[in-house]
Each structure stands twice: as structure tokens, then as C-alpha cells.
Amino acid sequence: TDSAFLLGPWIESARRLGEGRSDCVSSILDKDNPSGDCQRFLEWNARTQITTWKPTSKESTAIPQGPVDYAAKHWFGLIRDYYARRAQLTLEQAVKDEAAGRPLNKTAMNHFR
């Protein structure tokens, strides 16, 4: 396996860039990173770059407009930890909606991405 396509090294590289710095702020991350911790900020940014490409706060109730998963990568750690969980939640929602005799509730799925 080429380490260039593994999630762990990608995240660790981003965190190393922020070592010893506390001047990283973002209007999206302010509540989650009030101290301006650059390691946290750069890790969040690295994860966003390889998944949705849409910086979204945890409090958001909907996915921003535009292409979904624009930056999707099929890296080992992402498939195992991110996409597999999301697929499981989507399937659970589909089964629940089918049992209730209604179409898939896309609004409920917004927080899965």
C-alpha cells in the first residue's frame, strides 16, 4: 500500500504543520476551536479537503448547495472509518422509511455527510 493514499499519514502531516502554533481561526470552527489550535484546524481542513470539500460547522442542519463529495477519495482509512459508517446510516434510514411506507427522508440524511 502506498502511504500517499492512507488517511493516517495525511492527517499526521497536517497536524505536524500546526505544531506550536495557535493563530489558526475560522468562522466555521470558532466554537470547536476557540483557542486557535493550528493542529486541530489543519486536521479539520485536511479531512474536509479529501471528503466533502465543503467546510460545514457541526451545528449545520443541511449540507451546503453544490456537488456532494466533490473531493471524495478512496483511501483506506476513509473507506473503513468514514464511508462505511455513512453507508450504514443511509441504509438504516432507508429501512426505517421503507417500514413506515414513505420515501427516503433526504433531510434526515443531511447529517450523515
Image (cartoon, rainbow, N blue to C red):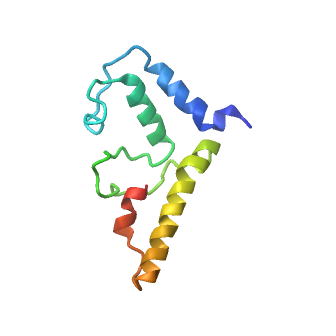
Q: State the quadrant of the N terminus.
A: top right
- Indicate the position of residue 84 as horizontal and vertical percent values: 57, 55
Q: Quadrant of residue 76?
A: top right
Residue 112 visible somewhere in the drawing: yes
* Residue visible at 48% across and 53% down in the picture: 69
Tell me how many marks there are: 0
- Indicate the position of residue 39 as horizontal and vertical percent values: 42, 24
In the rendered image, the residue lying farthest to the top is 20
* Residue visible at 49% across and 68% down in the picture: 92
* Residue visible at 37% across and 60% down in the picture: 110
Instruction: State left or right for residue 16 relative to residue 26.
Output: right
Using the image as rendered, state which of residue 77 and residue 56 is in the foreground.
77
In the rendered image, the residue lying farthest to the right is 1
Q: State the quadrant of the C terminus.
A: bottom left
Relative height, residue 60 to residue 14 (above, below)? below
Q: Quadrant of residue 28?
A: top left
- Indicate the position of residue 42 as horizontal and vertical percent values: 42, 29
Relative height, residue 46 to residue 35 (above, below)? below
Q: Quadrant of residue 57?
A: top left
Residue 73 visible somewhere in the drawing: no
